[in-house]
Amino acid sequence: MTANTTVKPPLAERPTLLGWLRKNLFNSWGNAILTVAAGWLTFVTLRGLLTWVFTEADWTVIQTNLRLILLGQYPIAEVWRIWVSMLLLAFLIGNSLSIWGKGKTSTRFTVGLMGLLFALAFVVSGPSRTWLLAMGAVLGAGWWLARGAGKAMRNVVGIGWVVWPPIFILLLRGFTPDEGFLPLVGTNLWGGLMLTFMLTIVGIVFSFPIGVLLALGRQSDLRIVRWFCITFIEVVRGVPLITILFMAQLMLPLFLPSGLTIDRVLRAMVGITLFSAAYLAENVRGGLQAIPKGQYEAAYALGLSNPLSMGLIILPQALRLIIPILVGQFIALFKDTALVAIVGLFDLVGIARTVLAQPAFLGTHREVYAFISLLYWVFSYAMSYVSIRLEDSLGVGKR
Amino acid sequence: MTKKLYPVLGLLLATAVLLAACGGSPAPATGEAPVVEQPTAAPAEIIFTTPSGYGVTLEAVQSRGNLICGVNSQVPGFGYVDADGNFSGVDVDYCRALAAAIFGDATAVEFRPVTAAERFTALQSGEIDVLSRNTTWSTLRDTELGGNFVHTTFYDGQGLMVREDSGITDIAGLDGGTICVQTGTTTELNLADVFAAAGVSYTPAVFEDADGTFAAYAEGRCDAVTTDKSGLVSRRTVLADPDAHVILDVTMSKEPLGPMVRHGDDQWFDIAQWTVFALISAEEFGVTSANVDSMMTSSNPEVLRMLGAEGELGAALGLSADWAYNVISQVGNYEEVYNRSLGPDTPTYIPRGLNSLYTEGGLLYAPPFR
């Protein structure tokens, strides 16, 4: 007997389409009614949606304002800086896919992403096309170069991910005040999807260490530290994000000496970071409490000092445990940044609202909101996918 | 021992924070009162002692190199961002005019989108130099909220929209008709007042929200619909066939919208005020961005004084002599500004109505340039 001589089940039990339908969807009167009703509902909804998307909706509002929606009022002459950052990002993504991706899925995903970029390149025109083609090529090159990479390469790519956000922000902002190399682009010109990203990245990068510190501080034996952490966490968790943003935009300027103003985007970033840090602290505390006492004791038995045992034994395990929660929180943070539209910043939602006020496109609410929802979904899903990959490679839920 | 110290420390800390907060409140800028020489015609030089805030805003704006103008980014025709990423609208063009008056460069302005909630705080805290964001002039805003309104740039007011084929042109034409109105608003009360005063009878069809009101009108359940004119304009454009509806040249309430500046700097107030007057006077004298150069040799002495070809009116404001010339050559006169965003060729057309010159039956009336 060899592996490929499998015994087929009797005819009556072979999976046919009709048989499967009968078994799963129409196995009782109740289920049959449910199936028909659900099918009808799906059909009606889908038909309405697709008819609207392909025949009724007027997508010129998106075509005309695509740059505004993606980049806000960022000056056209400086857009190359964003593209350069995107090239770096594409390279990193290519590297990561081939290092942490899994065999065929990794290949398929890379080719899919490249295809998507090339397809986009044919939709747009002008210099964006060249940049998009370059992005696709760089992504592929990054994937190819990192194939069969060793531990050293992994570390380099890891460092790359840490270094990329500050580079991105520095490139966007520029250095020199007026003319010259990389002139300053004020944050009042940042907007669209880019600002949403910026707020998210800064929120994640800074709230993570602060949150971990707060979680550790909450368990500290030093009373002032503990009380400070508890007060901070409970106060910030006790108010909605929108009130924190309102405080930052409306109250803070009144307390500052006249003449001293803090950048509005910076204020929003600080508000979002502190808010996220308080929640993150509680998530990390949950992770810390899930580590058995034996681990602490083992660390002490090895003679490790308190910081060392935390850094080498406890935290790595605790953080690994809470990856799904953390990613959930970061996705929520990504979407929460939409609230800054209410305090007058031009993030994705803010810019959508001003696009709606253009006299040429009045009454295109559905098109604009549908498009930005799609953008939000694409990036939230990407984050979720990365999280699942990360969990797989770290073996969360298996050990 | 140490335990007892905590409450004391806490108290000290709290006091320090309070003091810091109080010290940081937006009091008028301190420092000794600057003594400025006022240019006068009198041969003897008279030295005025001016209040401490006088001139600080212009100085700050000039040393910064640009004007920061608080605007709305979501009102069609008044303030929005166009597809190229530039701010447009009537309120926005006023900011450009002010920048042109100060710097001779209409692009030396940074637009700061502010929401309705934060606009007065932003002005008070000095985050913006001037607020030009469809703000209605009212008593409390002019006093307690720490600002001064300069001359009104747009007289908004409650208007009426009807179907064009109905042939209605005024309130009397609506006698016995049905009017869609949002309930619980001043709009509903104004409607009742105006129609009672005109002796015209009507049936109100009231709705909870603006969407419902306009949906009912679109379905033909009413002969007319009423709300603020600028609102009617944006609502009209989302109707199935916008051209089939007209906004009547009737104004039923007072909504004077104008720029606002901080209390305490009269020089800045004057500059903001006279920029509006320059726009209005230019229309009155027929000075446009196209003919402003030839107007420099006009036979009308007031035009010459305004454009700085004669006299020193600019210096009185602390500006260059050609400040009004810059405003008109770069931004245009009131009519040009109005037509660019609200004129007949735009989707957001609003008839001039009250916003016509006093010579044409409107309310635009600028004091003489002298």
Image (tube, grey):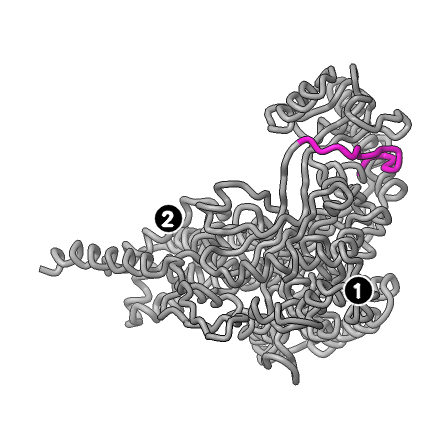
Is disc 2 in contact with disc 1, using a CB cutoff of under 8 Å?
no
State the residue at coordinates (66%, 21%): B192
Q: Is residue A292 above or below residue A117?
A: above
User: Is disc 2 surrounded by few (<14), some (14 to 19) or many (20+) residues within 10 Å?
Assistant: few
The magenta segment is: B238-252
Name the quadrant containing residue A369. top right
Q: Residue A106, can we see it?
A: no
Spot occupied by residue A344 in the image (x, y as percentages of width and height): 59, 53
Regarding mark 1 in the picture, which secondary structure is present there? loop
Q: In terms of depth relative to the viewer, which is nearer, A293 or A64?
A: A64
Residue A186 image-quadrant placement: bottom right
Classify mark 2: helix, strand or loop.
helix
Residue A235 image label: 2
x, y (%) of residue A255?
39, 58
Asked whether residue B109 is drawn in magenta, I would say no
Residue at 53 percent across and 75 percent down: it is B63
> Is residue B342 toward the left or the right of residue A392 in the image?
right
Above or below, A322 relative to B99? above
* Identity of the residue furthest to the left in this view: B1
B220 left or right of A95 in image: right
Position of residue A218 measured from the top left corner of the image (x, y, whole percent): 32, 55
Chain of the residue displaying label 2 = A
Of the two numbered discs 2 and 1 in the rendering, the one whose residue sits closer to the viewer: 1
Residue annotated with mark 1: B289
Residue density around tag 1, few if under 14, some if 14–19, many if 20 or more, within 10 Å = some
Distance between mark 2 and mark 1 Cα atoms: 57 Å
Task: Examine the rendered structure and indicate whether residue A1 appears above or below residue B61.
Answer: above
Q: Amino acid at mark 1?
A: Ser
Give the numbered dot on residue A92: none
Q: Is residue A176 above or below residue B328?
A: below
